[in-house]
Image (spheres, helix red, strand yellow):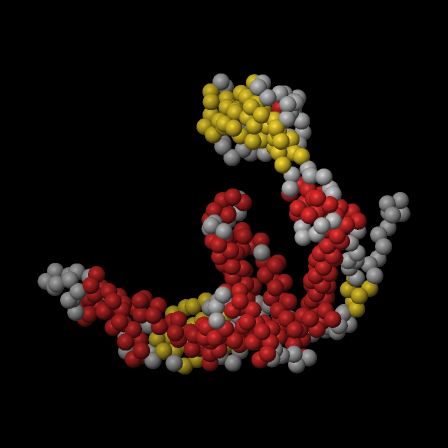
């Protein structure tokens, strides 16, 4: 195999890859052996038609496509290894010569990793983030815990906002019941607006045992087109009224929902955890702000193909996470009204930011000679082994040298992020103007 690299504009390159004629011939023969059992010609038993006979009848190029598909991946992989530049996109492949007895030649247009010229990256100024935990935040967390531990209790009174009404219902349009408009023993949270129009409000003030006619109008953009914009009547029977009861905020509550015996201890633990979370959030926000400032000072020309590859990778990663939740990308698009194409386009700014961040941090690591050590790698392997519940030796074996190289690069980038964050200068945020001044 031979390789020629032609540099193009905007960090693009065209690789011209030539595969020897004998390898092409072997690939054509392999394609013939693979497909001969599917070809029937009068006078020959199935699978026994000579290759020359097939090529005479259908043309010499009959097996070319399968041969090319077999040769391109391996030849391209070897070319990537030989190429002195780092390729950062999927290839756009074009076959330029395929003919028996001659070398197989194809081109691959790819994006090359851009060079980065750093501006200021040490001592970058960012706004200091307040991490003080207020009493109101502690109380809000406590109240959320009360909500989480609330219970629904049947009451003998009229329906009020915030209650749950257990109902039977059936909907009619022009006195005709419509599909999907009927339910029994349905628990409807009043004020949740989970039913259309002002359905829930019309139940307020009614009691268990009452029958109510609820009049609503379907939205113009309603998903069932035959109902969109039409008035409807729901015949509703209220079977039960339930109200939410919150536990008392006292020592007993604290001992039931935590490891502490008193409310005071529990509140102190909440404050501590909120403070830790704020510290971590502030650390992440500071890092993001520093990297954003470094990107603004840096110079780099990112090829479109590199961004497109990152977009596709992000969508693929998202699709895998959906599968782990029992959903696929088509279902998600159906629920959200998106298409795979619109999703790819919507994440373009995020993909660009991810590329820029990685590039400037790699440049900082190179400038500061920041590298990951074998000890860093061992610790990362231990984390991965614990996460996947595997032996560390097995993780190393699966990973191989290519995987190790990638992890070492990732660790160096992580260290570079720590470096720029720790070397940044924090300044107090400007006080907001009073409304009267504005």
> Left or right: 317 with respect to 24?
right
Residue 72 spot, x, y in % from top left: 38, 71
Q: Is residue 263 above or below residue 46?
A: above
Q: Nearer the viewer, residue 391 or 123?
A: 391
Q: Quadrant of residue 277?
A: bottom right
> Left or right: 84 with respect to 97?
right
Q: Is residue 146 above or below residue 180?
A: below
Quadrant placement of the N terminus: bottom left
> Left or right: 349 with respect to 52?
right
Residue 375 visible: yes
Q: Quadrant of residue 99?
A: bottom left
Residue 267 spot, x, y in % from top left: 75, 50
Residue 407 spot, x, y in % from top left: 55, 73
**How many numbered circles does the render carry?**
0
Q: What residue is shown at x 35% (from left), y 68% (from top)?
A: 69
Q: What residue is shown at x 58% (from left), y 31% (from top)?
A: 188
Q: What residue is shown at x 63% (from left), y 67% (from top)?
A: 356
Q: Is residue 137 above or below residue 9?
A: above
Residue 9 spot, x, y in % from top left: 56, 71
């Amino acid at each position: 195999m031979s390789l020629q690299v032609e540099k193009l504009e905007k960090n693009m390159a065209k690789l011209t890859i030539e595969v020897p004629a004998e390898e092409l011939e072997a690939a054509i023969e392999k394609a013939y052996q693979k497909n001969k059992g599917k070809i029937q010609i009068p006078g020959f038993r199935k699978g026994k038609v000579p290759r020359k006979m097939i090529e005479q009848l259908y043309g010499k190029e009959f097996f070319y496509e399968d041969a090319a598909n077999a040769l391109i991946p391996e030849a391209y992989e070897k070319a990537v290894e030989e190429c002195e530049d780092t390729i950062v996109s999927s290839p756009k492949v074009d076959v330029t010569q395929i003919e028996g007895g001659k070398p197989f030649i194809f081109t691959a247009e790819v994006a090359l990793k851009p060079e980065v010229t750093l501006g200021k990256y040490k001592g970058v100024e960012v706004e200091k983030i307040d991490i003080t935990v207020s009493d109101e935040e502690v109380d809000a967390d406590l109240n959320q815990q009360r909500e989480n531990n609330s219970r629904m209790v049947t009451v003998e009174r009229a329906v009020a906002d915030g209650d749950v009404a257990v109902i039977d219902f059936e909907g009619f349009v022009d006195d005709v019941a419509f599909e999907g408009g009927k339910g029994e023993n349905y628990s409807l949270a009043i004020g949740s607006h989970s039913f259309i129009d002002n359905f829930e409000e019309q139940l307020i003030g009614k009691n268990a045992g009452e029958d109510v006619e609820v009049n609503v109008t379907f939205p113009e953009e309603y998903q069932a087109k035959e109902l969109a914009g039409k008035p409807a009547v729901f015949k509703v029977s209220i079977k039960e009224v339930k109200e939410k009861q919150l536990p008392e905020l006292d020592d007993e509550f604290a001992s039931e929902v935590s490891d502490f015996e008193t409310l005071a201890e529990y509140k102190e633990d909440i404050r501590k955890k909120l403070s830790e979370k704020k510290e971590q959030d502030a650390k992440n926000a500071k890092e993001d702000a520093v990297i954003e400032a470094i990107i603004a000072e840096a110079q780099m020309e990112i090829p479109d193909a590199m961004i497109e590859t990152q977009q596709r990778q992000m969508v693929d990663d998202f699709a895998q996470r959906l599968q782990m939740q029992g959903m696929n990308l088509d279902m998600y698009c159906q629920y959200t009204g998106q298409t795979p194409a619109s999703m790819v386009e919507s994440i373009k700014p995020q993909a660009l930011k991810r590329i820029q961040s990685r590039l400037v941090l790699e440049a900082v690591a190179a400038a500061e000679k920041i590298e990951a050590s074998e000890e860093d790698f061992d610790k990362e392997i231990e984390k991965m082994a614990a996460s996947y519940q595997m032996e560390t030796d097995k993780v190393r074996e699966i990973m191989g040298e290519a995987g190790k190289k990638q992890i070492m690069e990732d660790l160096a980038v992580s260290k570079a992020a720590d470096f720029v964050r720790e070397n940044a200068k924090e300044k107090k945020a400007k006080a907001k103007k009073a409304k009267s001044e504005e």
